């Protein structure tokens, strides 16, 4: 039920000045109004001078952080932020969590919940609570959607990302998400990587101009416009300069995954994460000719042929990446109950030249099934190591 905004903000003020405050974020804007800062984050810190309330703000271009003393100074700083026309507040204390959204009519939609008690040591066995890499209460879920299924998918993706990058990675990281769509995994990746202390610059590419505008507006609301940007264009042709360190391609349909992998190879990207979607190309090729002996039973039934085409396509993709200087593996990155398209091709560039045996292994499989993988065709036009 909508509530009077003034009363809801008074409640927010009380929580912000509560000694048990753990974290708070203000973002977004109200209808027809724009705050002087795009985003504000508050959290308690302990300095040599004593406890302070740290307030980090961003104008969309550069961040600014200040530490204010408890008492009158903190109260004045909090009142100053509450006077800004933010559209959303997310506040966490040791005992409570409050999420406030300002409606188009200027009222407050408020969700209140008790903060879950976190034991000092997680219990052993199957009752242990799941720990997410990105807090389910993070304000980003208020923007990208926070259903339980989406949070699980985000967490599964971030775990795959964490397993791909070195634990000791520091400094800057340039990321490109090819075929980003509505970009909820794009934003989650930025949030997670930046919280690891990396200086992340992320570009999302999607063919639809309306998606570019929508995602750009969201980046501005989050205060990330200086680090997260979007371009409209095809995976094969969108201008991305300079070349990225990490390439993401999540559920790009059919040969769009091949286009993303081909660009990653040409860029000599250090890491690649690709979650393929449908696999029509090789399935069509398999339908057009008899299977080699003795594998006719694998492709005689339509449903088996389609599933085998999925396996063959991703096996050949992983093999081609290995031929072109990557260590690659295909893993399950989210439980199949959430989506049947749950495989992830994970690759790390080694720069090691493929052995004759590796090239022969790939070529023998292609020749036996008499198929022409799209990724091989795309890479054939570039100056890359020979496949055979």
Image: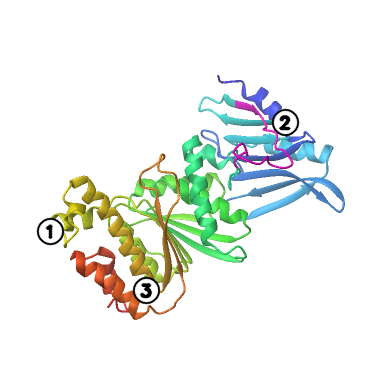
Q: What is the C-alpha distance between the residues marked 2 and 1?
A: 66 Å
Q: Nearer the viewer, mark 2 or mark 1?
A: 1
Q: Residues within 10 Å of mark 1 (few under 14, many from 20)?
A: some
Q: Nearer the viewer, mark 1 or mark 3?
A: 1
Determine the residue positioned at 22% across, 56% down: 281
Q: Position of residue 144 (x, y in %)?
A: 48, 41
Q: How many marks?
A: 3
Q: Position of residue 353 (x, y in %)?
A: 40, 80
SS at mark 2 in the image: loop
Q: Judge left or right: residue 344 versus residue 369.
A: right
Residue at the outermost left position: 289
Q: Quadrant of residue 84?
A: top right
124 in the magenta segment: yes
- Image quadrant holding the C terminus, namely bottom left
Residue holding disc 3: 324
Q: Taken as a whole, is the magenta stretch helix, strand or loop?
A: loop
Q: Nearer the viewer, mark 3 or mark 2?
A: 3
SS at mark 3 in the image: loop
- Image quadrant holding the N terminus, namely top right
Q: Which residues are magenta?
A: 111-130
| N-term-proximal mark, 3 vs 2 | 2
Residue holding disc 1: 290
């Amino acid at each position: 039920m909508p509530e009077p905004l003034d009363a809801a903000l008074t409640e927010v003020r009380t929580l912000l000045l509560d000694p048990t405050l753990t974290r708070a974020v203000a973002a977004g804007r109200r209808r027809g109004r724009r705050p002087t800062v795009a985003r504000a984050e508050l959290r308690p810190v302990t300095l040599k001078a004593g406890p302070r309330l740290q307030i980090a703000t961003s104008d969309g271009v550069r961040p600014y952080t200040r530490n204010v003393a408890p008492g009158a100074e903190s109260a004045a700083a909090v009142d100053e932020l509450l006077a800004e026309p933010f559209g959303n507040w997310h506040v966490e204390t040791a005992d409570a969590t409050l999420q406030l959204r300002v409606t188009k009519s200027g009222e407050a939609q408020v969700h209140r919940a008790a903060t879950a008690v976190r034991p000092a040591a997680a219990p052993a066995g199957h009752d242990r609570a799941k720990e997410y890499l990105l807090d389910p209460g993070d304000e980003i879920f208020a923007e990208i959607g926070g259903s339980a299924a989406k949070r699980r998918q985000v967490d599964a993706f971030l775990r795959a990302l964490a397993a791909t990058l070195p634990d000791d990675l520091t400094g800057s990281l340039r990321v490109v998400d090819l075929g980003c769509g509505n970009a909820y995994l794009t934003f989650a990746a930025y949030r997670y990587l930046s919280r690891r202390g990396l200086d992340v610059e992320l570009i999302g590419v999607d063919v639809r101009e309306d998606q570019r505008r929508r995602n750009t507006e969201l980046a501005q609301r989050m205060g990330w416009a200086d680090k997260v940007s979007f371009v409209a264009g095809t995976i094969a042709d969108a201008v991305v300069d300079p070349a990225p360190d990490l390439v993401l391609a999540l559920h790009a349909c059919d040969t769009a995954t091949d286009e993303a992998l081909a660009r990653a190879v040409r860029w000599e990207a250090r890491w690649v994460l690709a979650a393929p979607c449908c696999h029509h190309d090789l399935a069509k090729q398999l339908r057009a000719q008899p299977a080699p002996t003795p594998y006719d039973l694998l492709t005689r039934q339509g449903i088996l042929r389609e599933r085998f085409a999925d396996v063959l396509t991703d096996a050949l993709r992983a093999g081609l990446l290995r031929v072109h200087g990557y260590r690659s593996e295909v893993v399950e990155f989210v439980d199949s109950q959430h989506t049947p398209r749950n495989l992830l091709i994970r690759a790390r560039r080694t720069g090691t030249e493929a052995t004759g045996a590796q090239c022969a292994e790939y070529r023998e499989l292609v020749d036996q099934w008499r198929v022409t993988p799209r990724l091989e065709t795309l890479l054939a036009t570039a100056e890359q190591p020979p496949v055979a």
